[in-house]
Amino acid sequence: MCGIVGYLGKKDGIKSVLLGLKELEYRGYDSAGIAAIDIEGILIDKKVGRVSKLEKSLKKSSNKYSLAIGHTRWATHGKPTEANAHPHFNTSKNIFVVHNGIIENYQEIKDLLIKNGYKFESETDTEVVPHLIDYYYNKTNNLEKAFELTIKDLQGAYAIEMISTLSPRNIYIARLGSPLVIGNKNKEYFIASDPTAIIEQTNKVRFLEDYDIAIVSDKGLKVKNLRSNKDSKSNFELLEYVSEESSLGKFPNFMLKEIHDIPKTIETALKGRINVSKGTVKLGGLDSVIKQLEHIDRIIIIACGTSYYAGLVGEYLIEEIAGIPTEVQLASEFKYRNEPISRSTVVIAVSQSGETADTIAALKKVEEYGVLRLGVVNSIGSSIARMTDAGVYCHAGAEKAVASTKAFVAQTTVLALIALRLSKSKGLLNKKVIKELDKLPKLVEEILDSSDKIKTVANKYKNNKDFLYIGRGYNYPSALEGALKLKEISYIHAEGYAAGEMKHGPLALIDESFPTMAIATDSRLLDKVKSNIEEIKARKGPIITISTKGNRNISKLSDDNIFIPSTIEQLQPILVCVSLHLFSYYVAEGLGRDVDKPRNLAKSVTVE
Ligand code: M6R
């Protein structure tokens, strides 16, 4: 889950690499490092902490270095220390490597290298790579060959860049299971884990595929696929690029900004896709597969984390609106299950980043079943967007805070649109859902306007050690999402439960110190939720309710209440989750947490 970048050209490589690293910090932010080469020599700098720390240290260097590679790390093997930070190098310090992914057979390779006299300075899996290149170089006296032989020995997932004073105008690159893109502008080359890191510098890009190894040099780009053993064409494509507002504006951090982006996010997700007066939905991304979609009898949604919870809302929506049996599976579990999947099944991958390793692996697993694979993805041009047969973009814009907020809303909105598009009926429910979808941006504005009230409630409960979130029906996923968001950014233990499950175990937890956030909005299941609330109250558990504006009966039942505007229950998770996101945000802010970059996490989980 790290980010890697590289630069080869005639300009300031350090500046270019730092620019890319800052964009990739969402992939990991516990340490950062850079290696650069030019006629003046080698520069290597690593710092524990954020890219800004590395940047500060690099300001001392007046040299520009026209060849450089950089890395921002999320620790997998070994603690965040300078020794474990990338780039890693061989003992002679003439081969430098940055790596994203995991080398699964690193211990085996390390043992062999140690037997051959190699010494290691770090606890990482990556350090075997420069030493192994060195080992093969000593045998072959050919750096390109040594790189290729090394890559062939590696098992696991990787995106690797290597530079060396033995060949100081080349960057050697390899990819298996971790994304890599190469950008080009005249005689400059930019390498990165994803296009966002280089798009400000060029939109002319070439995505590498699994088993590709490549060399970037002043002569151009050379790509070879190790599986087919053939040279690949180095065709660049122009990436559609919409410049995004990346500054915080009036907001103190990206999470709050992104929550406030939500009305616009919904508008964009719906734009050109719904016709309220006709009650119809148009999704251009599905046009090419619409005939196939007419014959499906099962949908499997695969996702992780918050995207999984959006998928759960999607399951309820698709089953009720389109009448197609749907299930949601955690990608990390799905990929190892041996379940029968028929060709009339559609697999939908939901992912903000489009780079989540488990979701990618789950999609790869179903490749051999010959099923249709769709994507509900936010990041344009990401791996999942490119590997699926068709799909619908979320168009939520860049989401920078680790905690997913506006992307969850966009995913849920898009899944509602897919449910409507798959529905063979054009009945009352469909019309109602379309009409209410159209109203959502204004309703979210109302919630944002009531932020102060949510902040007051958050401050009252911020010192609690545990939290339970309960909901039923469409708001069962909201309870799970609310709990995840609270633990993720405030580090308070929180669990989400189906309210009906309370008596089957969790009720034992309840006492005066264990508050419950009960989602008790107007719905077919409200009376049932009310009974669950009474049962908690009878055990002295403090209750915060989320209820529908105007329903005073619920607020009377609880210690504290947060109102959401009225909407149909099918779309309530969107409004409920905006309130729950704000609640978590204010708890975390009150506790002084680093809201955008919570400890131990990264925005994009690119290792399994
Ligand atoms: O990029 P993805 O949507 O595939 O990411 C999935 C999860 O890693 C992500 O939703 C994670 O749970 C968030 N940090 C939650 O806020």
Image (tube, rainbow, N blue to C red):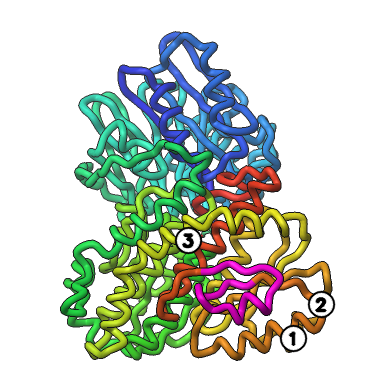
**For the magenta stretch, what is the residue range?**
545-563
Type of amino acid at the residue the image marks with label 1 = Glu
Residue occupying image coordinates x 21% and y 74%: 276
User: Mark 3 and mark 1: span between their CA atoms?
Assistant: 29 Å
Which of the marked residues, 1 or 2, is nearer the chain's N terminus?
1
279 sits left or right of 134 in the view: left
User: Mark 1 and mark 2: span between their CA atoms?
Assistant: 9 Å
- Residue count near mark 1 (Cα–Cα under 10 Å), binned few <14, some 14–19, many ≥20: some
The percent coordinates of residue 606 (x first, y second) are: 50, 53
Quarter of the image holding residue 195?
top left
Which of the marked residues, 3 or 2, is nearer the chain's N terminus?
3
Comparing 96 with 153, the one in front is: 96
The residue at which mark 3 appears reads as 447
User: Mark 3 and mark 2: span between their CA atoms?
Assistant: 29 Å
For residue 535, the mark is: 1
Type of amino acid at the residue the image marks with label 3 = Ile
Type of amino acid at the residue the image marks with label 2 = Lys
The residue at which mark 2 appears reads as 540
Residue 598 sits above or below residue 529 on the image = above
The percent coordinates of residue 127 (x first, y second) are: 60, 38
Quarter of the image holding residue 319?
bottom left
269 sits left or right of 546 in the view: left
The local secondary structure at tag 3 comes to: helix
- Residue count near mark 3 (Cα–Cα under 10 Å), binned few <14, some 14–19, many ≥20: many
Comparing 485 with 37, the one in front is: 485
The percent coordinates of residue 30 (x first, y second) are: 62, 39
Residue 38 visible here: yes
Residue occupying image coordinates x 60% and y 50%: 601
Residue 99 visible here: no
> Is 590 covered by the magenta stretch?
no
The local secondary structure at tag 2 comes to: loop
